Amino acid sequence: MSGKKNKDIFLAPFSKDNPVIVQILGICSALAVTAKLEPAFVMALSVIAVTTLANFVISLLRNTIPPRIRIIVQLVVVAALVILVDQVLKAFVYDVSKQLSVFVGLIITNCIIMGRLEAFAMGNKPFPSVLDGLGSGIGYGLILIIVGFFRELLGSGTLWGFQIIPQSWYAANGGFYENNGLMILPPMALIVFGIIIWVHRSRNKELQEK
Amino acid sequence: MNKNSNTYIILYATILVVVVAAVLSFAAISLKPMQQANIRIEKMSAILSSIGEGKDASSAPSKDAYIETQYAKYIVASFCVDAEGNEVQGADAFAALDNLPEVFALKSAMPVFVAKLDDGKTLYVVPTTGKGLWGAVWGYIALEDNCDTIYGVVLDHKSETPGLGAEIATPKFTEQFVGKQLFKDGKFQSIQLTKGVGSSAGNPYAVDAVSGGTLTSNGVSAMFKNCLGDYVPFFEKHNAAKVKVLMLAPVEESNNEEVVDQTNN
Protein backbone atom coordinates (compact mmCIF):
# COMPACT_ATOMS: atom_id res chain seq x y z
CA MET A 1 0.00 0.00 0.00
CA SER A 2 1.51 3.32 -0.98
CA GLY A 3 1.01 6.37 1.21
CA LYS A 4 -0.65 8.20 -1.65
CA LYS A 5 -3.33 5.60 -2.02
CA ASN A 6 -4.10 5.52 1.71
CA LYS A 7 -4.49 9.27 1.62
CA ASP A 8 -6.99 8.94 -1.21
CA ILE A 9 -8.92 6.28 0.67
CA PHE A 10 -9.16 8.60 3.65
CA LEU A 11 -9.95 11.82 1.80
CA ALA A 12 -12.27 10.66 -1.00
CA PRO A 13 -15.39 10.44 1.21
CA PHE A 14 -14.99 14.07 2.27
CA SER A 15 -16.08 15.44 -1.06
CA LYS A 16 -16.16 13.61 -4.37
CA ASP A 17 -17.22 10.29 -2.86
CA ASN A 18 -19.19 11.66 0.09
CA PRO A 19 -21.53 9.00 1.47
CA VAL A 20 -24.41 11.40 2.08
CA ILE A 21 -24.41 13.89 -0.79
CA VAL A 22 -22.89 11.71 -3.53
CA GLN A 23 -23.88 8.17 -2.62
CA ILE A 24 -27.10 9.41 -0.94
CA LEU A 25 -26.76 6.98 1.96
CA GLY A 26 -27.62 7.51 5.61
CA ILE A 27 -30.18 10.22 4.79
CA CYS A 28 -32.72 8.82 7.22
CA SER A 29 -30.72 9.35 10.39
CA ALA A 30 -29.31 12.59 9.03
CA LEU A 31 -32.83 14.03 8.75
CA ALA A 32 -33.67 13.06 12.29
CA VAL A 33 -30.73 14.39 14.30
CA THR A 34 -29.90 17.65 12.56
CA ALA A 35 -32.52 19.94 14.12
CA LYS A 36 -29.83 21.04 16.59
CA LEU A 37 -26.07 21.20 16.22
CA GLU A 38 -25.13 19.33 19.39
CA PRO A 39 -26.97 16.04 18.73
CA ALA A 40 -25.75 16.20 15.13
CA PHE A 41 -22.18 16.43 16.38
CA VAL A 42 -22.54 13.55 18.84
CA MET A 43 -24.29 11.46 16.20
CA ALA A 44 -21.38 12.18 13.84
CA LEU A 45 -18.86 11.06 16.48
CA SER A 46 -20.86 7.90 17.20
CA VAL A 47 -21.08 6.99 13.52
CA ILE A 48 -17.35 7.66 13.03
CA ALA A 49 -16.59 5.33 15.95
CA VAL A 50 -18.87 2.62 14.62
CA THR A 51 -17.74 2.75 10.96
CA THR A 52 -14.09 2.74 11.96
CA LEU A 53 -14.36 -0.12 14.45
CA ALA A 54 -16.72 -2.15 12.26
CA ASN A 55 -14.42 -1.79 9.27
CA PHE A 56 -11.48 -2.87 11.42
CA VAL A 57 -13.22 -5.92 12.89
CA ILE A 58 -14.67 -7.10 9.59
CA SER A 59 -11.36 -6.57 7.85
CA LEU A 60 -9.63 -8.74 10.47
CA LEU A 61 -12.25 -11.45 10.03
CA ARG A 62 -12.57 -11.09 6.25
CA ASN A 63 -10.73 -14.30 5.37
CA THR A 64 -12.72 -16.42 7.81
CA ILE A 65 -16.24 -15.11 7.16
CA PRO A 66 -18.39 -17.68 5.31
CA PRO A 67 -19.58 -15.86 2.13
CA ARG A 68 -23.12 -17.16 2.49
CA ILE A 69 -23.73 -15.54 5.86
CA ARG A 70 -21.42 -12.54 5.46
CA ILE A 71 -24.22 -9.96 5.66
CA ILE A 72 -25.46 -11.51 8.89
CA VAL A 73 -21.96 -11.49 10.33
CA GLN A 74 -21.56 -7.83 9.39
CA LEU A 75 -24.88 -6.99 10.95
CA VAL A 76 -23.99 -8.77 14.20
CA VAL A 77 -20.70 -6.90 14.43
CA VAL A 78 -22.33 -3.53 13.69
CA ALA A 79 -25.20 -4.14 16.11
CA ALA A 80 -22.80 -5.14 18.88
CA LEU A 81 -20.68 -2.03 18.33
CA VAL A 82 -23.74 0.23 18.32
CA ILE A 83 -24.97 -1.23 21.60
CA LEU A 84 -21.51 -0.66 23.05
CA VAL A 85 -21.53 2.98 21.90
CA ASP A 86 -24.99 3.42 23.40
CA GLN A 87 -23.91 1.95 26.74
CA VAL A 88 -20.79 4.09 26.86
CA LEU A 89 -22.80 7.25 26.08
CA LYS A 90 -25.29 6.39 28.82
CA ALA A 91 -22.49 5.93 31.31
CA PHE A 92 -20.35 8.95 30.47
CA VAL A 93 -22.45 11.62 28.71
CA TYR A 94 -25.94 10.88 29.98
CA ASP A 95 -27.49 14.19 28.90
CA VAL A 96 -26.40 13.72 25.30
CA SER A 97 -27.50 10.10 25.19
CA LYS A 98 -30.91 11.25 26.36
CA GLN A 99 -31.11 13.67 23.44
CA LEU A 100 -30.06 11.09 20.89
CA SER A 101 -32.38 8.48 22.45
CA VAL A 102 -33.55 6.20 19.66
CA PHE A 103 -31.19 7.55 17.02
CA VAL A 104 -28.19 5.75 18.47
CA GLY A 105 -29.99 2.47 17.88
CA LEU A 106 -30.68 3.61 14.34
CA ILE A 107 -26.95 3.67 13.58
CA ILE A 108 -27.38 -0.10 13.05
CA THR A 109 -29.52 0.59 10.02
CA ASN A 110 -27.22 3.29 8.64
CA CYS A 111 -26.50 2.13 5.10
CA ILE A 112 -23.10 3.81 5.09
CA ILE A 113 -21.73 1.31 7.56
CA MET A 114 -22.98 -1.80 5.79
CA GLY A 115 -21.95 -0.26 2.49
CA ARG A 116 -18.37 0.31 3.60
CA LEU A 117 -18.12 -3.15 5.14
CA GLU A 118 -19.39 -4.85 2.02
CA ALA A 119 -17.54 -2.66 -0.49
CA PHE A 120 -14.25 -2.14 1.30
CA ALA A 121 -13.52 -3.99 4.53
CA MET A 122 -14.38 -7.41 3.08
CA GLY A 123 -11.57 -7.07 0.55
CA ASN A 124 -8.88 -4.94 2.19
CA LYS A 125 -6.31 -5.10 4.96
CA PRO A 126 -7.16 -3.66 8.41
CA PHE A 127 -5.19 -0.41 8.16
CA PRO A 128 -6.71 0.88 4.88
CA SER A 129 -10.09 -0.32 6.16
CA VAL A 130 -9.75 1.77 9.29
CA LEU A 131 -8.85 4.79 7.13
CA ASP A 132 -11.82 4.14 4.88
CA GLY A 133 -14.17 3.86 7.86
CA LEU A 134 -12.76 6.98 9.45
CA GLY A 135 -13.04 8.91 6.18
CA SER A 136 -16.61 7.80 5.50
CA GLY A 137 -17.66 8.58 9.05
CA ILE A 138 -16.12 12.06 8.87
CA GLY A 139 -17.70 12.63 5.46
CA TYR A 140 -21.09 11.80 6.94
CA GLY A 141 -20.40 13.91 10.01
CA LEU A 142 -19.38 16.98 8.00
CA ILE A 143 -22.68 17.04 6.16
CA LEU A 144 -24.59 16.49 9.41
CA ILE A 145 -22.86 19.45 11.01
CA ILE A 146 -23.44 21.72 8.00
CA VAL A 147 -27.14 20.84 7.94
CA GLY A 148 -27.41 21.08 11.73
CA PHE A 149 -25.79 24.51 11.62
CA PHE A 150 -28.37 25.95 9.22
CA ARG A 151 -31.34 24.23 10.81
CA GLU A 152 -30.52 25.35 14.34
CA LEU A 153 -29.57 28.88 13.30
CA LEU A 154 -32.66 29.51 11.16
CA GLY A 155 -35.08 27.30 13.07
CA SER A 156 -34.27 28.17 16.67
CA GLY A 157 -32.03 31.22 16.38
CA THR A 158 -29.37 29.46 18.41
CA LEU A 159 -26.12 27.57 17.82
CA TRP A 160 -25.09 24.81 20.20
CA GLY A 161 -27.83 26.09 22.49
CA PHE A 162 -26.52 29.68 22.62
CA GLN A 163 -28.75 32.47 21.37
CA ILE A 164 -27.29 33.96 18.17
CA ILE A 165 -30.16 36.03 16.82
CA PRO A 166 -30.51 38.99 19.23
CA GLN A 167 -33.62 38.76 21.43
CA SER A 168 -34.62 42.31 20.46
CA TRP A 169 -35.06 41.23 16.82
CA TYR A 170 -37.97 38.97 17.63
CA ALA A 171 -41.48 40.02 16.80
CA ALA A 172 -42.52 39.02 20.33
CA ASN A 173 -40.17 41.71 21.67
CA GLY A 174 -41.19 44.34 19.15
CA GLY A 175 -38.72 43.37 16.42
CA PHE A 176 -39.19 42.11 12.88
CA TYR A 177 -37.84 38.56 13.09
CA GLU A 178 -39.49 35.20 13.58
CA ASN A 179 -37.82 31.78 13.74
CA ASN A 180 -38.66 29.57 10.78
CA GLY A 181 -40.58 26.72 12.37
CA LEU A 182 -40.32 24.67 9.19
CA MET A 183 -36.54 24.43 9.60
CA ILE A 184 -36.86 22.15 12.62
CA LEU A 185 -39.11 19.70 10.82
CA PRO A 186 -37.56 16.84 8.81
CA PRO A 187 -38.84 17.97 5.37
CA MET A 188 -36.70 21.08 5.57
CA ALA A 189 -33.65 18.93 6.31
CA LEU A 190 -34.29 17.15 3.03
CA ILE A 191 -34.48 20.48 1.22
CA VAL A 192 -31.24 21.64 2.84
CA PHE A 193 -29.64 18.38 1.65
CA GLY A 194 -30.94 19.07 -1.82
CA ILE A 195 -29.36 22.51 -1.81
CA ILE A 196 -26.04 21.13 -0.59
CA ILE A 197 -26.08 18.45 -3.31
CA TRP A 198 -26.89 21.10 -5.93
CA VAL A 199 -24.03 23.35 -4.83
CA HIS A 200 -21.65 20.40 -4.62
CA ARG A 201 -22.51 19.12 -8.09
CA SER A 202 -22.23 22.46 -9.76
CA ARG A 203 -18.73 22.79 -8.30
CA ASN A 204 -17.73 19.22 -9.28
CA LYS A 205 -18.68 18.81 -12.92
CA GLU A 206 -17.45 15.19 -13.08
CA LEU A 207 -20.26 14.16 -10.71
CA GLN A 208 -22.98 15.30 -13.09
CA GLU A 209 -24.71 12.53 -14.96
CA LYS A 210 -24.89 12.89 -18.71
CA MET B 1 -11.36 -25.73 5.27
CA ASN B 2 -14.38 -25.28 3.04
CA LYS B 3 -15.98 -22.01 4.05
CA ASN B 4 -19.25 -22.97 2.40
CA SER B 5 -19.80 -26.18 4.32
CA ASN B 6 -22.75 -26.26 6.69
CA THR B 7 -20.57 -27.32 9.61
CA TYR B 8 -18.28 -24.35 9.13
CA ILE B 9 -21.15 -21.90 8.83
CA ILE B 10 -22.94 -23.18 11.92
CA LEU B 11 -19.75 -23.31 13.93
CA TYR B 12 -18.76 -19.81 12.79
CA ALA B 13 -22.15 -18.33 13.60
CA THR B 14 -22.22 -20.00 17.03
CA ILE B 15 -18.77 -18.81 18.04
CA LEU B 16 -19.44 -15.28 16.75
CA VAL B 17 -22.69 -14.98 18.67
CA VAL B 18 -21.21 -16.33 21.89
CA VAL B 19 -18.23 -13.98 21.69
CA VAL B 20 -20.44 -10.96 20.94
CA ALA B 21 -22.83 -11.87 23.75
CA ALA B 22 -19.95 -12.17 26.20
CA VAL B 23 -18.52 -8.78 25.20
CA LEU B 24 -21.90 -7.05 25.46
CA SER B 25 -22.78 -8.64 28.81
CA PHE B 26 -19.42 -7.61 30.19
CA ALA B 27 -19.91 -4.03 28.99
CA ALA B 28 -23.48 -3.85 30.28
CA ILE B 29 -22.57 -5.18 33.72
CA SER B 30 -19.46 -3.07 34.16
CA LEU B 31 -21.14 0.17 33.02
CA LYS B 32 -24.39 -0.38 34.88
CA PRO B 33 -23.40 1.28 38.20
CA MET B 34 -22.37 4.44 36.34
CA GLN B 35 -25.56 4.51 34.29
CA GLN B 36 -27.73 4.06 37.35
CA ALA B 37 -25.83 6.78 39.18
CA ASN B 38 -26.54 9.09 36.22
CA ILE B 39 -30.26 8.31 36.31
CA ARG B 40 -30.34 8.86 40.08
CA ILE B 41 -28.57 12.21 39.80
CA GLU B 42 -30.89 13.26 36.98
CA LYS B 43 -33.97 12.60 39.14
CA MET B 44 -32.49 14.39 42.14
CA SER B 45 -31.56 17.30 39.95
CA ALA B 46 -35.10 17.48 38.50
CA ILE B 47 -36.65 17.46 41.98
CA LEU B 48 -34.22 20.18 43.06
CA SER B 49 -34.96 22.40 40.09
CA SER B 50 -38.71 22.14 40.77
CA ILE B 51 -38.04 23.88 44.09
CA GLY B 52 -35.64 26.32 42.41
CA GLU B 53 -32.43 24.88 43.84
CA GLY B 54 -29.40 23.12 42.37
CA LYS B 55 -28.82 25.81 39.77
CA ASP B 56 -25.05 25.83 39.98
CA ALA B 57 -24.68 22.19 38.94
CA SER B 58 -22.90 22.99 35.67
CA SER B 59 -20.32 25.22 37.33
CA ALA B 60 -19.74 22.91 40.31
CA PRO B 61 -16.43 21.00 40.23
CA SER B 62 -18.29 17.71 40.62
CA LYS B 63 -21.85 17.86 39.42
CA ASP B 64 -22.81 14.58 41.07
CA ALA B 65 -21.46 15.50 44.48
CA TYR B 66 -23.06 18.95 44.26
CA ILE B 67 -26.49 17.52 43.45
CA GLU B 68 -26.16 14.91 46.22
CA THR B 69 -25.37 17.50 48.88
CA GLN B 70 -28.04 19.91 47.68
CA TYR B 71 -30.59 17.11 47.67
CA ALA B 72 -29.64 16.05 51.18
CA LYS B 73 -29.85 19.66 52.31
CA TYR B 74 -33.25 20.60 50.91
CA ILE B 75 -35.26 17.39 50.66
CA VAL B 76 -36.00 16.69 54.30
CA ALA B 77 -38.44 13.81 53.96
CA SER B 78 -40.07 11.55 51.44
CA PHE B 79 -42.92 9.09 51.75
CA CYS B 80 -45.59 7.37 49.70
CA VAL B 81 -49.34 7.91 49.90
CA ASP B 82 -52.18 5.70 48.69
CA ALA B 83 -55.34 6.66 46.79
CA GLU B 84 -57.06 7.66 50.07
CA GLY B 85 -54.22 10.01 50.93
CA ASN B 86 -52.86 7.89 53.77
CA GLU B 87 -49.16 7.44 54.24
CA VAL B 88 -47.91 3.99 53.23
CA GLN B 89 -45.41 2.50 55.65
CA GLY B 90 -42.14 1.06 54.36
CA ALA B 91 -42.46 2.27 50.76
CA ASP B 92 -39.40 3.89 49.20
CA ALA B 93 -40.51 7.11 47.50
CA PHE B 94 -37.34 7.55 45.46
CA ALA B 95 -37.44 3.98 44.16
CA ALA B 96 -41.07 4.51 43.11
CA LEU B 97 -39.82 7.09 40.58
CA ASP B 98 -38.28 4.29 38.51
CA ASN B 99 -41.63 3.13 37.24
CA LEU B 100 -44.11 5.97 37.50
CA PRO B 101 -46.73 4.74 34.98
CA GLU B 102 -47.17 1.60 37.06
CA VAL B 103 -47.20 3.55 40.31
CA PHE B 104 -50.06 5.71 39.04
CA ALA B 105 -51.89 2.71 37.61
CA LEU B 106 -51.83 0.91 40.98
CA LYS B 107 -52.28 4.09 43.06
CA SER B 108 -51.16 2.16 46.13
CA ALA B 109 -47.95 4.03 46.89
CA MET B 110 -47.42 7.37 45.15
CA PRO B 111 -44.29 9.28 46.14
CA VAL B 112 -44.26 12.68 47.86
CA PHE B 113 -41.10 14.65 48.63
CA VAL B 114 -40.99 17.27 51.34
CA ALA B 115 -38.57 20.13 50.84
CA LYS B 116 -37.56 22.81 53.29
CA LEU B 117 -36.15 26.00 51.79
CA ASP B 118 -33.59 28.32 53.34
CA ASP B 119 -36.34 30.77 54.33
CA GLY B 120 -38.15 28.03 56.28
CA LYS B 121 -40.82 27.47 53.65
CA THR B 122 -42.08 23.90 53.37
CA LEU B 123 -42.81 22.60 49.87
CA TYR B 124 -44.34 19.36 48.64
CA VAL B 125 -42.96 17.90 45.41
CA VAL B 126 -44.97 15.28 43.55
CA PRO B 127 -44.04 13.51 40.31
CA THR B 128 -46.35 13.27 37.31
CA THR B 129 -46.22 11.13 34.21
CA GLY B 130 -48.19 11.04 30.99
CA LYS B 131 -48.08 10.73 27.22
CA GLY B 132 -46.97 13.40 24.77
CA LEU B 133 -47.20 13.10 21.02
CA TRP B 134 -44.31 10.71 20.37
CA GLY B 135 -43.51 9.28 23.76
CA ALA B 136 -43.64 9.75 27.48
CA VAL B 137 -43.74 13.16 29.15
CA TRP B 138 -43.14 13.59 32.86
CA GLY B 139 -42.47 16.24 35.42
CA TYR B 140 -42.14 17.29 39.04
CA ILE B 141 -44.55 19.76 40.58
CA ALA B 142 -43.53 21.67 43.69
CA LEU B 143 -46.52 22.91 45.72
CA GLU B 144 -46.53 25.35 48.58
CA ASP B 145 -47.51 24.22 52.04
CA ASN B 146 -51.22 24.75 51.28
CA CYS B 147 -50.94 22.05 48.55
CA ASP B 148 -52.74 24.42 46.24
CA THR B 149 -50.38 27.09 44.89
CA ILE B 150 -47.67 25.94 42.48
CA TYR B 151 -44.18 26.93 43.52
CA GLY B 152 -42.31 25.48 40.56
CA VAL B 153 -42.60 22.96 37.76
CA VAL B 154 -40.07 20.89 35.86
CA LEU B 155 -41.15 19.04 32.76
CA ASP B 156 -39.27 16.63 30.56
CA HIS B 157 -40.05 14.38 27.63
CA LYS B 158 -38.68 11.39 25.82
CA SER B 159 -39.00 12.31 22.16
CA GLU B 160 -41.19 15.35 21.50
CA THR B 161 -40.41 17.38 18.36
CA PRO B 162 -37.53 19.79 18.99
CA GLY B 163 -38.71 23.39 18.79
CA LEU B 164 -42.39 22.42 19.01
CA GLY B 165 -43.56 19.92 21.65
CA ALA B 166 -40.10 19.81 23.17
CA GLU B 167 -40.55 23.43 24.27
CA ILE B 168 -42.47 22.15 27.31
CA ALA B 169 -39.11 21.38 28.92
CA THR B 170 -37.81 24.95 28.57
CA PRO B 171 -37.78 27.31 31.58
CA LYS B 172 -39.67 29.84 29.47
CA PHE B 173 -42.64 27.49 29.37
CA THR B 174 -42.47 26.07 32.88
CA GLU B 175 -42.10 29.40 34.67
CA GLN B 176 -45.66 30.18 33.54
CA PHE B 177 -46.88 27.71 36.15
CA VAL B 178 -45.48 29.59 39.14
CA GLY B 179 -48.27 30.91 41.34
CA LYS B 180 -51.03 29.02 39.54
CA GLN B 181 -53.58 27.18 41.66
CA LEU B 182 -54.98 23.66 41.70
CA PHE B 183 -58.13 24.17 43.76
CA LYS B 184 -61.09 26.42 43.01
CA ASP B 185 -63.35 26.96 46.03
CA GLY B 186 -62.02 23.76 47.56
CA LYS B 187 -62.61 21.71 44.41
CA PHE B 188 -59.77 20.23 42.38
CA GLN B 189 -59.43 22.18 39.13
CA SER B 190 -56.01 21.16 37.76
CA ILE B 191 -54.11 23.31 35.26
CA GLN B 192 -55.19 23.60 31.64
CA LEU B 193 -52.92 24.46 28.71
CA THR B 194 -54.93 26.88 26.61
CA LYS B 195 -54.33 27.74 22.96
CA GLY B 196 -52.96 31.09 21.90
CA VAL B 197 -50.41 33.48 23.37
CA GLY B 198 -51.97 35.35 26.26
CA SER B 199 -55.09 33.18 26.31
CA SER B 200 -54.44 32.21 29.91
CA ALA B 201 -53.82 35.75 31.16
CA GLY B 202 -55.52 36.33 34.51
CA ASN B 203 -56.67 32.71 34.79
CA PRO B 204 -55.08 31.03 37.83
CA TYR B 205 -55.94 27.57 36.49
CA ALA B 206 -54.38 27.82 33.01
CA VAL B 207 -51.13 28.53 31.18
CA ASP B 208 -50.44 29.24 27.50
CA ALA B 209 -49.93 26.03 25.51
CA VAL B 210 -46.94 25.55 23.22
CA SER B 211 -47.75 26.90 19.76
CA GLY B 212 -47.36 24.13 17.21
CA GLY B 213 -47.36 21.57 19.99
CA THR B 214 -51.06 21.05 20.55
CA LEU B 215 -50.92 17.29 21.01
CA THR B 216 -48.02 17.54 23.43
CA SER B 217 -49.84 20.30 25.29
CA ASN B 218 -52.98 18.19 25.52
CA GLY B 219 -50.83 15.38 26.91
CA VAL B 220 -49.43 17.68 29.58
CA SER B 221 -52.93 18.90 30.52
CA ALA B 222 -54.11 15.30 30.85
CA MET B 223 -51.02 14.39 32.85
CA PHE B 224 -51.70 17.16 35.37
CA LYS B 225 -55.33 16.24 35.67
CA ASN B 226 -54.68 12.53 36.16
CA CYS B 227 -51.58 12.51 38.30
CA LEU B 228 -52.31 15.53 40.48
CA GLY B 229 -55.89 14.27 40.72
CA ASP B 230 -54.57 11.08 42.29
CA TYR B 231 -52.95 13.15 45.03
CA VAL B 232 -56.08 15.17 45.80
CA PRO B 233 -57.11 13.01 48.83
CA PHE B 234 -53.61 13.53 50.23
CA PHE B 235 -53.73 17.28 49.62
CA GLU B 236 -57.14 17.57 51.26
CA LYS B 237 -56.11 15.46 54.25
CA HIS B 238 -52.94 17.45 54.61
CA ASN B 239 -54.84 20.74 54.69
CA ALA B 240 -57.57 19.41 56.99
CA ALA B 241 -54.96 18.17 59.46
CA LYS B 242 -53.20 21.49 59.39
CA VAL B 243 -56.37 23.46 60.07
CA LYS B 244 -57.26 21.22 63.01
CA VAL B 245 -53.80 21.39 64.48
CA LEU B 246 -53.91 25.15 64.22
CA MET B 247 -57.33 25.37 65.87
CA LEU B 248 -56.46 23.02 68.69
CA ALA B 249 -52.87 24.04 69.11
CA PRO B 250 -53.20 25.55 72.61
CA VAL B 251 -55.07 22.62 74.18
CA GLU B 252 -53.45 19.86 76.20
CA GLU B 253 -51.41 17.02 74.86
CA SER B 254 -54.02 14.32 75.48
CA ASN B 255 -56.47 16.21 73.30
CA ASN B 256 -53.93 16.55 70.56
CA GLU B 257 -53.67 12.79 70.27
CA GLU B 258 -57.38 12.62 69.80
CA VAL B 259 -57.11 15.06 66.94
CA VAL B 260 -54.53 12.89 65.27
CA ASP B 261 -56.88 9.93 65.59
CA GLN B 262 -59.67 11.84 63.96
CA THR B 263 -57.59 12.88 61.03
CA ASN B 264 -56.59 9.29 60.41
CA ASN B 265 -60.17 8.10 60.28
Image (cartoon, helix red, strand yellow):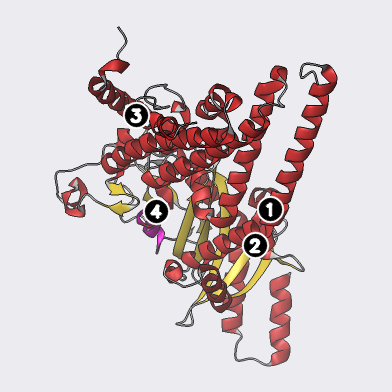
Do residues under tags 2 and 4 come within 8 Å of each other at their CB atoms? no
**Of the numbered discs in the image, which one, if any, rests on residue A206?**
none
* CA–CA distance in space, label 1 to label 4: 26 Å
Tag 3 secondary structure: loop
Cβ atoms at labels 2 and 1 below 8 Å apart: yes
Residues at discs 3 and 4 in contact (Cβ within 8 Å): no
* Residue designated by label 1: B103
Crowd class of label 2 (few under 14; some 14 to 19; many from 20; radius 10 Å): many
* Distance in Å between CA atoms under marks 3 and 4: 38 Å
Q: Give the residue displayed 40% in from the left and 32% down from the top.
A: A4
Q: Is the magenta stretch mostly helix, strand or loop?
A: helix
Q: Residue B111 carries which label?
A: 2
Range drawn in magenta: B172-181
Q: Is mark 2 on a helix, strand or loop?
A: strand
Residue lying at 52% horizontally and 49% vertically, measured from the top left: A98
Determine whether A4 is above or below A37 in the image: above
Marks 2 and 4, the one that precedes in the sequence: 2
Seen in the picture, residue B60 relative to A150 is either above or below; the reply is below
For disc 2, the chain is B
Please name the residue that numbered disc 4 is placed on.
B170
Marks 2 and 1 sit apart, C-alpha to C-alpha, by 9 Å
How far apart marks 2 and 4 lie (CA) works out to: 24 Å
Q: Residue B94's quadrant in the figure?
A: bottom right
Which badge, 1 or 4, is on the more N-terminal residue? 1
Cα–Cα gap, marks 3 and 1 = 53 Å
Near mark 4 (Cα within 10 A), the count class, few <14, some 14-19 or many ≥20, is few
* CA separation in Å, label 2 and label 3: 55 Å
